[in-house]
Image (cartoon, rainbow, N blue to C red):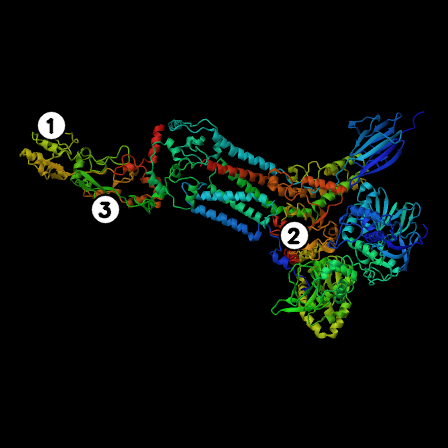
Amino acid sequence: MEPSEELLDVAIVGSGPAGLAAAARAARRGMRHLLLEKTDHLADTIFRYQKGKHVMATPPQLLLRCDLAFEAGARETVLARWAEDAAAAGIAVRHHAEVTEISGTRGDFTLGLADGTRIRAAHVVLAIGTQGNPNLLKIPGVGAPGAPVVQYTLDDPAAFVDEHIVVVGSGDAGIENALGLAADPAQGNHVTLLNRSADFAKAKDANVKALMAARDAGRIAVLTETAPNRLEAGHMVVDTRDGEARLRCDRVIARLGSAPPRAFVEKAGVAFTSAAREAFPLLSPQFETSVPGLHVIGALAGYPLIKHCLNQGHDVIEFIAGNTDLRPADEPILERVFAGLQPARPVDDWIAFLRARVSIFRPVSPLQMRELLLDATVRRYAAGEVVFVKNDVGASLFAIAEGAVEVEIDPGPPRRTATIGEGSIVGEVGLISGRRRGATVRAATPAILVELPRTAALRLIGTVPDAGAEVDRITTTRLLLQIFQSGLVAEDLAPILETARTVTARAGEAIVTEGETGDDMFVIRRGSCTVEKRIGGRPVFLRYLPAGSYFGEMAVLDGTPRTATVRAAIRSELIRLDGAAFRRLFEARPELRARTLAEMAARRALNAFIEERKDRFGSAVDLYSETAAFLVENGLGEATDALLIDERLCVGCDNCEKACADSHDGLSRLDREAGRTFAYLHVPTSCRHCEHPHCMTDCPPDAIRRGPDGEVSINDSCIGCGNCVRHCPYGVIRMDSPPPRKPGLLSWLLLGRGPGPGEPPKAWAKAERARLRTEAPPKKAVKCDMCAGKAGGPACVRACPTGAAIRVSPETFLALAGRRD
Amino acid sequence: MPPPPARFRLRQVSQRLAGGEIVRERDLGPGPVTIGRATDCDIEIPDLAVALRHLMLAAGAGGEVVLSPEAPVLVDGHPASPGPLPLAEPRTIALGSYRLTIARDAAEAGAILLTLEQAPVDRALPDRLTPPVAGRRTAAWVLGLVVLLAFLAWPIAGFLARPLPPTAATARALAAEPHFARAGPRSDRAWLSGPMSSAHARLVADCKACHQAPFESVTDSTCRSCHEDAHDHARPDRLLAVLAEPPGPVAAARAMAGLPPGRCTVCHTEHEGPKLLSNPETSGCAGCHRDLSHRLSDTPLRDAGDWREDHPEFRPFVVAGFEGPRPLLRQVPLDRRPEDRNGLRFSHAQHLSAANAVARMAQRLQAYGRPLGCADCHRPEKTGPGFLPVAMERDCGACHSLAVADASGRIVELPHGKPAEVVATLAGLGPPVAPRPTVAGAARALPGAGPASPGLAPAADLRAAAPFLPGGVCRDCHEVQRDSAQGRLTFAIAPVHLIGRFYQRSQFPHGQHKTVRCATCHAAGTSEQAEDLLLPAIATCRQCHGNADWAARHPETKASGACATCHWFHPDARAPGPDARGIVRTARGAVADAGRRAG
Amino acid sequence: MNAPARPSAPSTTARRAPQAIHEGFLAHRRYRWAWIAALLAGSSVLLYALDDPWPRPNGGTALGYALGTLSAGLIVWLSLLGIRKRRFTDGPWSLKAWVSAHVWLGLALAIIATLHAGFQFGWNVHTLAWALMMGVILSGVWGVVLYQRLPRQLSDNRATASERAMAAALAESDRALEAAARPLGDREAALVRDALATPAVGRSLGSRLAGRVPRCGTAAALRALPEGDPELAPLRDLLAARSVLLARIRTNARLKTWLQVWLLVHVPLTVALLAALLAHIVSVFFYW
C-alpha cells in the first residue's frame, strides 16, 4: 500500500484493552480509524498470559462503558470474546505495524511505521501500555543465515527438543526460561545461561536457588561473567573472563529487559508529570497530552486495570468526537463518595480541593485521583469525633483535607495528645503491616478526612513515587521526633529530611560494621535487622530490630565508631539520614544534644554491660547467639506468630499437618518436615504471619488481610493469581483446590474406610495429580490462617500430642533461644 | 532383480514430564544395527539391564530381520535364538525398561521401522521413605473379636443352651453325687469370679444351678431349693427391719439394682475360697447386734458389738422362786449378783472340802477314795458341751442313801421325790422295796437311824414321819413343808428346779476347756449356799478370749473373741427357755446335718 | 506520634498465655496431671487401707464397685484418646493436655484397678481384663519411654536434612550410579542394578526395626568391586556415599518404626481390653 495520503480521523496505537475499546468505539461511531498492532494478534499482553489464566474484572463497582464485553474469566474466553466483538464492530486493524515515530499536532499527525509506511491522522490515541519493546541482542551475526535463531520471548518451553539453547540475561525472566527449557530431560535440550556479572542480584532468591540446583544437577550450564560476542553458524562465541569461548547454539533466547516507552512518547513531544522513572504523562481530564490531539490512555496513562482501559478507550473517542458533555464513567460513583459533604460541589472541584490541600495527593494526577477515590471514603468529622480507636482492626490511611486531628499518645491522666494538622496523614503505621491501630485518633476541630483503604493507599504509594516519598517523609519525621523527644520540632528536622535516602539491603548484608566510623543514622522502613557484636572473635547476637526501629544514633550523638554490626535479617529497605545534617543541628543547639544523650542512656548501658562481660561469654552464649541467628535467618525475625517444633519432643506423628488439613478442607497449610533445623529447633514450612507480609504486597483482589488476632489470611475473594505464592520468601503459600467431603471419623477408625483424618481422599488426590499434569494449577491460594475463629487457637499446636509444636511471637522466640540447654 | 537392501529407521518415543510424547526419528541405513548400552551402538539404550552389546539386527534377504543376540533376548515374551525373524506382524523385544518394536514401515516400502519406547517410569519422589507401621486395625479387630467371642458370646450361648436345674429333690440327689455335673457346655467357667466354698465346690461346673436367670441376683428361693429345711434367721419381717440399710447412696444403688436386703447372699457370700460361706466374724453378728436396739425398738436383746468392748454382762436364767410347783425363771445379769433359789439345800464348800467329814466319808467310800471333786457329781454330756443334770440317785445317792428299815424291820429304799410313798413305805403300807444296792463298802448310818436310839422302836407314825422331821434324811437337801390340812403324816417337799442351761443364747463348750480347772472359773470351793450362782462373769472369759496378749502366749488355744465362739446363731434343740421356738438352727448344725445326709 | 516506633502487638501477647518454651506432655502445666493422678491413686490406696470389708476386699464391696466404676470410666476415657486426637476441629482443647492426662491417669489406673480387684486373681475373664489392662499400661509406658528418647536420636540422625531431602538425595544417587555404571561392563552393571533394586527401607517390620535390609545390593556391590581399579573408583565412591546415605535412611526408618511399633501392641491390646472389660462387666451382672 502506498503511504496513505488519506487522513484518518483517529489512529490508535496498540490493541490492548484500551486501544481495542477505542477502535471499537471509533468503528461504531463510523469514524475513519486504524488500529495499529505491532504483533500478529490483538491484545498481546493478555495474549501472553499463561494458558488458562484467570483474568480479573476489578474494581467491581466500576461500570463498564464500552463496545466490548468483558467479565472475569479465563484468558482464552476473554480474548475470544474481544475478537468476536471487534469483528462485529468492524474494526480496521493493521497487524505487524510497529509505530516508530509520531509527529505533528491536532488535525495532522504523521505516524511512521517500522516498515516505512506513514499514516496520517487527525488524532492519535496512544494505548501502548508500559511493557515497551524488549532490548535487543546487539551482537554481530544476529539474523545471519545459518546463525542461531534469536528470540526475545519464550511461549512454550516444551516446544523445543534436542536443541542447544543459550539464554542471555540474568533476571527472573531469563532464569525462568532456562529452567523451563531444561525442566524435562526427555526434551534433551542443552541449556546454557549467560550472565554478565558474577551474581544474580536482579533475580528472586527462589529462582536463583532453583537455578543453582539445576546447575548442580547438571541440567543447565551457567556461565557467569560471560557476555555474548557474536553468532556464527550453529554457535555463539562468548567473552569469558579467560577469553573467548565457542558454544554450540541452535537458538538464543535473549531476556535483556525492555526499554520503557517513555522515550518514544517524549519524542512525540509529550510532557511527563515528573522526572521520576515511573512518572506518567501529563494528561488533561480528556486524556489529552501536552501535544494537542495526542491522547494517552490505559496503562501508560497510569491505569493498569482492564476495566479502566476499556472505559478510557470508549471515552477518549467520545472526547475526540467532540462529546464534551461526557462525564467519566466513574462520575456517579465519585458523586456518591462526596455526597456526604456540604456544600454540594462538583466532583472535579472536590478533587482539586483535595489535591490542593493534602500533601500526598499533590503529585497525583486528577485522573489518578478519580481512580483512587473510587474506593475512598470522604466525610466530615465533628470536633471530638473519634476517627479510630486504639487496637481497632483497620489498615486504612486517613488524609486530613481540612481541620486537624489529635492523636492520643497517653490516655492519662495526664492525657497527652499530639495534633496533626491539615494536609498531613494519619493511620499510616498499619498501612504496610496491616496491624491494629496504635492509638486513638479524634478530630481536634471540625475536619474533612479522606479514608483510603489499604490497597488504594498502597497503590498510591507504589504508583506515584512522589506520594510514596511524601509518606516516607511524614513517617520518618514522626519517628525522629519520637526518638529525639527533647524539644525537637518538625521544622528542625527539615534539613535532615532533605538528606534522607532509601537504601536497600540484601539479607545478611551489613549496614553498619562494628568499629567502622560513620555517623549516618538509619530507620528500618521495611524488613528487619539484627545487631551483633564480635566477642572473642565470634559474632554474638545482641538484638533484633523490627521494621520501624532505628539505629546509628549513637554515632550521631558522640561521633564514636560503631559499637556493633547491624545486618539486614531479610531483604530490607532503610532510610539513611545524613549524620552531618544531624551534627549541624546539634552544634546549633547543644542543649538538645545533652538531653538526648541522657535519654538514650539505656541503650548505651546495655552495650557497656556486654563489653564488660566479654570474657564470661562462653559456649552457652554461642549457642544462644547461633540459635537466635538461625531463627532470624528463618524469618522469625519478621514473624508475628510462627510455628516452632522442638525435635526432641516431636515423634513425627504428623498430627499437626493432619489437624491443619482437617481444619481447612483437607488441605494442610503447613509442611512439618520441610524447613530447617538447628539445635533441635525446627522451623517448619508454615506461615510466620510476617510483620510486613510479603504476600500482601500484590494481591489484586485484596484477598489477603490481617485479621483481628494478627493472622494474615486469604479470604474467598482469592482469584488464584499466584502472586502471593511468588512473593512469599518462605514458600508457605500453595495453590490448591479443596477436595470433596469424606466419610466420618469412626468409619475410618474402625473400618479403614475413606481417607484418614487430615488426608484428602485417595482417589481425589490421584485424580488431582493426574489433572495437574495436563491442566493449569488450581485456583485458590491456601495458607495458614492461624485457625482464626476456631476456639482454642491453632489446630497444629492443639493437636500436637507431645508439646513439640508451639507458636511463638517475636517477643518470645528469642527467650526460647536463650533458654535452651 | 533382487529387492533393494532394506533400510532401518528408528523412531524413538519419549514421555514428557508434563505428559505427551516426544518423537525423534532417525535413519539408520541398511544395517546391521547394533543395540546395547554402549555409546557406540547404533541404538544406545541407557538401561543397566541391557548389556553393553545386547543384540544386532540385520536385514534379511526376504524382508525379514536377522537377529544375532549377544545376551539373552525375549521376543514377544519368548526367548529368542539367533536367526531370521519374520515380520509378518510387528515383533517386540523387551530390553530392560525399554521396548523395541520391529515392524515394516508402512510409509516406505522395504524399510524396517524400529520403535523404541520406554515403559512409563514413575519419577515422582516418594512422599515418605518410611511407610507407617500398618496392621493396628486388623490386630485390634482380631483381638477384640476373639475376646468378645470367647469371653462373652460363648459363655452366654452356653448359659442359654443349658437347661434350668431340676427340682429340689433331684438337685439334692445330684448334689450328693461325688462328681456333680450336669450335661451341658461349661463355657462360662471363665466367668468364675473366685474359688467356690467347699460346700458348693461341686457346683463349680454348673453356674446355672444357682444363677438361674441372667442379670438377676441369686434368689433365696434358689438357695432354698436345696436348703429346704433352712430357717429364717428371724421372722422375715424382723430380719428385714434389722437389715434395712440406712438411706444413702449405697442403699439407693442396691434398690435400683433390684437387690433387696435380707437375702441369703448378703451374708452367705460365695466365690470367696473354700472355707467362707457364712460370715463368722464379729462384724457379721455385730452388723445387726451392735445397735439392734436402734434397729428394732422392741427387741429384748441387748446390743452387743465387739466382745471385749461392747458385750453386755452375762444374763443367766435363775430360779427366782416358785409359784406352786412351777419355778419362776428370771434373767439377771451377773453383775447384779443373782441368787438361784433352786429349792435345794447344798453347800459346794462342804462337799469339796478336803478335810471335813464329807471328805473323810468320800475317802472311805470305794467309789471315791479321796475327797470329792467336781466331776464326782457333774458328769459331762456324752454328746454336747454341757453336763448331765445332777441326779439324786446317781450323783448323791452314794452317800445320801435312802435305804431305811421300815416298820417291819425290812430295809427298804425310800422312793426319792415321792413323799407320800415314803410315808406309806415307812408305815409298812407300801409295797416292799428292794433295797437299792448302795455303793459298795458303804457302812454309813441308815437314814433315821442315826439320831434314833437303837432300842427304842418308834411308833409307826413317828417312824414314817422321821425323814421329814428335822434331822430327817430329806432335810439334808430339801425344805420340808408340813401340810397340816392333809393330816399328820402328810408331808410336802419344797419344789426344786435345777437349771440345766443358764444361758439361752450360748452354750459353754466345757469339752474345749478341759485344760482349765473348774475352780478357775467356778468359785465352788467357797460357796456355802445352794443359792450361790457359781457362773463366771464376762471378765473371767475375757482373761483369755479376745485377749491379744494371751492369745500370743498361747496360740494353740485358739481362744477367740469372735461371736461364734460362744454363740451359734441357731441354738440347738436343747436350748432352754421360753424363746427357743423362735430360734432357728445354726448354720453349723445345718452343715452337720447335710454332711450326715451326704454320708 | 501516631504510634510507637515498634507497632505493639497487643493481640498476640494478650490473647494467649505466653508460652515461650517447649514443655513436654509429661510436664504439661507443671505436672498438673501427675498430681491429679497421684491424688486419685493415693486416695484410692487410702480408702482401700481404711476399708475393712467382709469377707475380703474385692470388686463386690461398695468400695470395690466404686473403684471398678472409676476404673471402667478411666479405661473408656483413656481409650477415647484415639478418637480425640483425630477430631481436630471441635472445641478448645489441647491434645497435649489429653496425652498428659492419658499418661498419668493411665498409670494411676494400674493402681486403682488392682485395688478394685482386691489382689484377687484367677484364670478368668476378670483377671484377663486386668492382665490386658496391665499390658496396655506397660506398652504405654514403653511408648512414653520411646517418646522421650527417640526423637532426639531421630533428629541427630537426620541432622538438617528432611526425609524428603533424603529421598531426593537417594534419587540423585540412583541417577548418578546409573549414569556411572552405564559405560561399564555387564558385571558392574548387574551389581549396580542390584544396588538400585534393593529397597532403601526394608518392607518387613523386623528388618525395619533392625534398621537393616537383608542382602543389600549396595553393600554387596561394594564388596564385589575391587578397590584398586582406578576405572571403578568413581563407582565405588558413589556406592560408598550411597551406603552412608542408606545407613542414615535406615536409621531414620528404624527410629520412626520404633516410635510407631509400640502402638501396634498398645492399640490392639486396648481394643481387646475394651472387649474384655465389656465381658467382665456383663459377666458380673449376668451372674449377679
Q: Earlier in the sequence, mark 1 or mark 3?
A: 3
Q: Residues within 10 Å of mark 1 (few under 14, many from 20)?
A: some
- The residue that disc 2 covers is A786
User: Does the rendering let one see residue B390?
Assistant: yes
Task: State the residue in front, B232 or C218.
Answer: B232
Three-letter amino acid code of the residue under disc 1: Pro
Chain bearing mark 2: A
| Alpha carbons under labels 1 and 2: distance apart | 127 Å
- The residue that disc 3 covers is B337
Q: Using residue B467 as the reference point, say whether residue A708 is left or right of it.
A: right
Which image quarter: residue A653?
A: top right
Task: State the residue in front, A32 or A68.
Answer: A32
| Alpha carbons under labels 1 and 3: distance apart | 47 Å
Quadrant containing the C terminus of chain A in the rendered view: bottom right
> Is B558 situated above or below A19?
above
Mark 1 falls on what kind of element? loop
Chain bearing mark 1: B
> Is A612 situated above or below C30?
below
Q: Residues within 10 Å of mark 2 (few under 14, many from 20)?
A: many
Mark 3 falls on what kind of element? loop
Q: Residues within 10 Å of mark 3 (few under 14, many from 20)?
A: few
- The residue that disc 1 covers is B432
Determine the residue located farthest toward the right in the rendered image.
A2
Chain bearing mark 3: B
Three-letter amino acid code of the residue under disc 2: Met
Q: Position of residue B313 (x, y in %)?
A: 28, 45
